[in-house]
Image: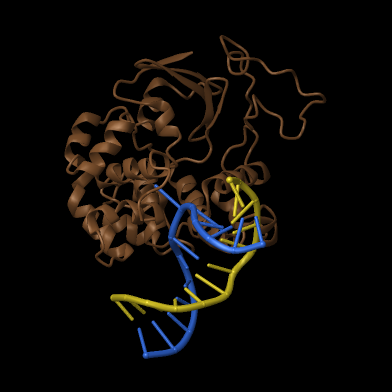
Chain colours: A brown, B blue, C yellow
Amino acid sequence: MISVPAAEFSLRTTLASGQSFRWTEQHGWWYGFIGPSALKIRQEGDQLLCHAADASLDANRIARYFALDLNLPEIISSINVDMQIHHAIAQYRGLRVLRQDGWETLASFICASFNNIKRIEGMIDRLCQAYGQPVALTPPPFDVADGGPARSAAPNGRAKGGGVNGFRGFSFPAPDTLAAAPERRLRSLGLGYRAPYLKATARLVADGTLRVEHLQRVGYDATKKALLGCDGVGDKVADCVALFGFEKYEAFPVDVWMERAMRYYFRHRKTTRKLIHDYARRHFGPYAGYAQQYLYHYMRNARPRAAA
DNA sequence: CGCCAGGTGCTGA
DNA sequence: TCAGCACATGGC
């Protein structure tokens, strides 16, 4: 069991805020992956308690994934510049922007376009089952110990859909695997017209045309430009990938929820997504991406009916 | 059933 | 550069 200090942090809010698609909550534990490593984790006060199925997952990597090294109060005070964002922050304090795997984020948000979160999660789950690698979940503490309710053993070995408490341990598919997948098969997993986009982008990554590691080390403009060269990646998806996968905190993805949130600033002026994007980056500054994530979660949850 | 979803690519002005 | 349109699919 690994214990990680986590002040100014809400695990539940962070994992339920729509920036990641592979975490599931069962009986008080969150099951998911950090990079290639499966784990279950829960929060008690200012501590994260974690069981890893993989010895390479240590406290440092966990803290890094959840961005616990960043000074959240400082970030928040920098974006807390108007009443709407103020309400969002007040309600969801502790929300942090994850540092997810770049390739997984890119592939996931190609699937996310013009789609809803429930279906995105299903699509990615099926993608992992079909093309990922099974990950052992059986090191002692993972599925049994303290407080984790051990589920009755699967009836006959690897029952379909088996796993721990409904969590299926399959790694995210590698770029070359998806590049080699038949488009028909990807469509049969429910990807729809995104299937050829995903395949083409996987090819770019697999053959080295898009060097994902490199994007970690260059700035926002260069990252976004490179991402826009991928099939199925436009302004919004590129901003999501830059923000969630490559630590570009000035990125400000604009989707339908952000259009709704930004009516607050534009009143009845006519706007476009590009106008909203440029305005928001100036308005919120270098951590505009954090503001976006607070507003996104706020609009989707705190207001059953946003005024038109 | 009809509307909506973390939009993108293509086309024609 | 920008508006208008097709695109797959399932949740609600």
Q: How many marks?
A: 0
Comparing A267 with A273, the one in front is A267
Query: Which of the image's four quarters has the C terminus of chain A?
Result: bottom left
Q: Is residue A216 left or right of residue A71?
A: right
Q: Is residue A126 visible?
A: yes
Q: Is residue A6 above or below residue A296?
A: above
Q: Is residue A71 visible?
A: no
Q: Residue at x 27, y 67 (%)?
A: A270
Q: Residue at x 44, y 60 (%)?
A: A209
The location of residue A110, given as percent across then percent down, is: 49, 55
Q: Is residue A293 above or below residue A144?
A: below
In terms of image quadrants, where is residue A169? top right
The location of residue A295, given as percent across then percent down, is: 32, 44
Q: Residue at x 67, y 28 (%)?
A: A163
Identify the residue at the far right of this view. Answer: A156
Comparing A181 with A46, the one in front is A46
The location of residue C5, given as percent across then percent down, is: 51, 77
Comparing A54 with A261, the one in front is A261
Q: Is residue A41 left or right of residue A307?
A: right
Q: Is residue A108 left or right of residue A157?
A: left
Comparing A158 with A82, the one in front is A82
The location of residue B6, given as percent across then percent down, is: 46, 53
Q: Residue at x 25, y 47 (%)?
A: A288
Q: Is residue A285 above or below residue A7?
A: below
